[in-house]
Image (spheres, rainbow, N blue to C red):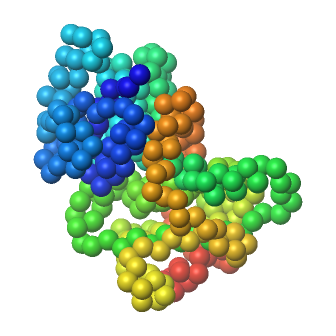
Amino acid sequence: MAKNFALTGASGYVAPRHLRAIKETGHRLVAALDPHDSAGVIDSYFDDAVFFTEFERFDRHIEKMRRLDGTNSIDYVSICSPNYLHDAHARFALRVGADVICEKPLVLNPWNIDALAELERESGCRIYTVLQLRVHPSLASLHEKIKTEKITTKKDIELTYITSRGPWYLVSWKGQLERSGGLATNIGIHFFDLLMWLFGPVQTSEVHLANSMKTGGYLELQNARVRWFLSIDKNDLPPEAAEKGQRTYRSITIDRQELEFSEGFTDLHTIVYRETLAGRGFGLDDARPSIELVHDIRNARVTAPGDNVHPALQKLL
């Protein structure tokens, strides 16, 4: 039976991936919210969804549907709104008796997870998040391979992610630390989740550089040593990427061997939705380690690196 979805953040960058996932899993969007009214993309998927620019009217509509006719109540709320609103929108969903599928990061602070866990128990509803790299076919295969291996020495890993952004980025909510959580949270959290999922929990964390445009540091995981670097500055792009006109460069090497996962990104949200609707979604406990890590990175004191510095940072420090 098709489920009823509502969606917050309908005009945002990531919303089309959720709209497509709802459509491709055979369900329907009945209501959407965004204070910005450039939400015409909805028509490509659900041209009869009711749209609101004010949360209060959206809230009233959802509550009315729940009380007047149980068959029209919302089953799921998909959250694509700015990071700092995820917690409040998840609470709203639980209050109206709906489960949640929330874009990363689920919340900004570890204690937000504790409060949501208590609300889950009270409401009987569930909160799931989108950790799409865990369902990438090649990464899922690597995870299974690592589970069967007996690792005797820690892997040496370099994570590099450069995604060029113009001046608009720092003016928007994404550039405001209290709203986005900073670069490690906004653009790095799914990579940190992936590495901990593959190589175990954090034992040591250092931050070697942190500003509004770039950040980097070192992690020691149970089975890996990780040098990491994140940037939105196009000047950090490797020459070979810049020469090709690429604005994004993504690389993870394991013992100097490139981890190839550049293909297969197009339908990862649909896979996450399909798994979640089948009862195999990623819940609060899955999200917690990466939320704790990026919170610690955001609040860490910047220290001088030793031999564990990322190559890109050597040029900057």
The answer to whether 159 appears left or right of 87 in the picture is right
Q: Position of residue 33 (x, y in %)?
A: 21, 38
> Residue 287 or 178: which is nearer the viewer?
287
Q: Position of residue 219 (x, y in %)?
A: 63, 62
Quadrant of the frame with the N terminus: top left
Vertical order, 243 against 287 (above or below): below
Q: Position of residue 174 (x, y in %)?
A: 30, 58
> Residue 271 or 169: which is nearer the viewer?
271
Q: Position of residue 267 (x, y in %)?
A: 46, 51
The residue positioned 29% from the left and 11% from the top of the image is: 70
- Quadrant location of residue 303? bottom right
The answer to whether 156 appears left or right of 126 in the picture is right
The residue positioned 40% from the left and 41% from the top of the image is: 24
The residue positioned 27% from the left and 73% from the top of the image is: 166
The answer to whether residue 284 is visible is no
Vertical order, 115 against 34 (above or below): above
Vertical order, 192 against 252 (above or below): above
The residue positioned 27% from the left and 43% from the top of the image is: 45
